[in-house]
Amino acid sequence: LNVDDIFVLDRNFNILNKPNLALSSCAPLFRQIYQLKNAQAIFHSHGIMCVMACALAEMQGNKNEFKISHLEMIKGIEGHGYHDELVIPIIENKSSEADLEDTLVAAMKDYPKSTSVLVRKHGIFVWSSNWEKNKIQCECLHYIFETALNLAKMGNNEKPICSLEKKQRKIILLDIEGTITPISFVKDVLFPYAYNNVDSYIKLNRKSKTIQKLILEIVACSRNSSNPKEPKINANSDNFNDELINDVCENIRWNIENDKKVPPMKTLQGFIWEEAYKEGKIKGLLFEDVPKALHDWSKNFRICMYSSGSRKAQQLLLSHTNFGNLTGKISCYFDLSSGPKFLKSSYEDISLTLGVYCHEITFITDILKEANAAKEAGCKVIVSVRPGNSQIQESHNFQ
C-alpha cells in the first residue's frame, strides 16, 4: 500500500486524489459520521464478535440495542466509566452498505452518547476524535462482545448482562481546584513540581513520540499566541535539539507561572506528575468531607470530573489521595478537550457525551465565570466556598 492507492477527499467528500480503484460503498456512511459527529477517525469492522453481539442481544429480547455494564473495558469507551451502562444501537443490514445511510443517521441521532453503531449480521462502525483513541475503542468493544458471549454461555443468557436494577442516574459534575482539593495544593505543590522538573523530564523523554507530539503542539500554541509577554519559541522544530528543548521549557515555565490553560502543556504536566505520584513524592490532598460526599452521591448519581488539568492528571490525583484511591467513585473525566470551562458550549458538549440533558447535570465549582456558563447551558449550579478560595460576590444568586 502506498500513497497513490489512497483516496483523498475534502470535508464535503469531493475527491481530491483518485487512484485506479473503486471508492468504498461505505463512503456515504463515513461522510455522515464525519459531519454529524465531527469525527476525525472512523473504523468499520466485520469482526465475528460484532455479529455475535447482535445475535446475543436479540436472544435476550433486546433486538435494537446491545447493553452491558460493570466491565473494566467499558472505561475504554469515550464518556463511560466502570459503573456506566454501555448502550450500542443495532440497525438492520441491507444488500448494499450505501443503503444503510438513513438508518445509521437515525441511530446516531437517537443515541447521542454512543460512539458506535452495530449492523446486524454485518459488523460495526466506530468513531472518535483521532485514530489512537478509536483503536482503543475498537479493541475494548471486541473484548466486551466476546466477554458478553462467554458470560451468556455460563448461564447468564436469560437477561441482558447489564445490571437491570440500575436506573439511569443524574450527573454531579465536579470541578477540582477549590472544590474537592485546596487551591494551595495545586499552587504550592503541583505547579512548582512541574515547574522545577519540566527540563529534566523533557530531556530524558525527548525521544518519546508522545512527548515529541506534545512539544510540537506547544510550539504551535506559542507561535499562535498574541501575548507579547509570553516567551516565544524561535528554535527550529525540525529536530528536538537542546535549543528547541530550552525554548519550550522556558515557555512552559512561563505558562505554569501565569496559570495559562494551554492544553498540550496541561497534558505534559500530567506525565510529569505521574512519576511523582508513583514514587510517593506527591500525594493528592482532598478536603476532609470529600470521601463521604463521593460515597453518598455515588448511590444516586453518576459522578464526573471537569477540570482544566488533563484527564490523566485528574485520575492520578484521585488515585493517590490522602484518603486512598477514590477513582472507583468516578464515572468519567473531562478536560479542556471538551472546551474552555467558561463557555456554554463546553457543558452542552459534555451533556451530549454523557447522553443526558443539561438540566440533569449539577455542576459544582468555585469560579463564577464557569458557574454562569454552566447555568446558561441549562445546568444546575452550586458554588463551592472553601478556605483559601478567592472571595466571590455574595449576590451571585447560586446555591
Image (cartoon, rainbow, N blue to C red):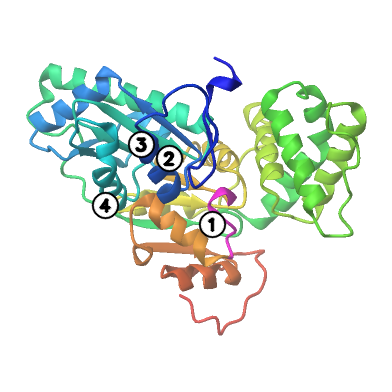
The residue that appears at 68% across and 50% down in the rendered structure is: 186
- The label shown at residue 175 is 1
Q: Amino acid at mark 3?
A: Tyr
The picture places residue 68, in percent across and down from the top left corner, at: 24, 34
Comparing labels 2 and 1, the label whose residue is closer to the camera: 2
Q: Quadrant of residue 219?
A: top right
Q: Quadrant of residue 75?
A: top left
Q: Is residue 69 at least partly visible in the picture?
A: no
Q: CA distance from mark 4 to mark 1?
A: 29 Å
User: Is there a contact, CB below 8 Å, between mark 4 and mark 3?
Assistant: no
Looking at this view, is 172 or 217 the one in front?
217
Q: Is residue 49 magenta?
A: no
Q: Pick whichever of labels 4 and 2 is earlier in the sequence.
A: 2
Q: Please provide the residue range marked out in magenta.
A: 336-342
Task: Say which element carries label 3.
Answer: loop
- The label shown at residue 82 is 3
Q: Pick whichever of labels 4 and 3 is earlier in the sequence.
A: 3
Looking at this view, is 244 or 333 the one in front?
244
Q: Residues within 10 Å of mark 3 (few under 14, many from 20)?
A: some
Q: Is residue 260 left or right of residue 297?
A: right
Give above or below for 374 relative to 35: below
Q: Residues within 10 Å of mark 2 (few under 14, many from 20)?
A: many
Give the residue number, with chain letter if any, for mark 2.
Answer: 78
Q: Is residue 353 left or right of residue 49?
A: right
Task: Say which element carries label 1.
Answer: loop
Q: CA distance from mark 2 to mark 1?
A: 19 Å
Comparing labels 4 and 3, the label whose residue is closer to the camera: 4
Q: Amino acid at mark 2?
A: Glu
Give the residue number, with chain letter if any, for mark 4.
Answer: 110
Q: Amino acid at mark 1?
A: Asp
Task: Say which element carries label 4.
Answer: helix
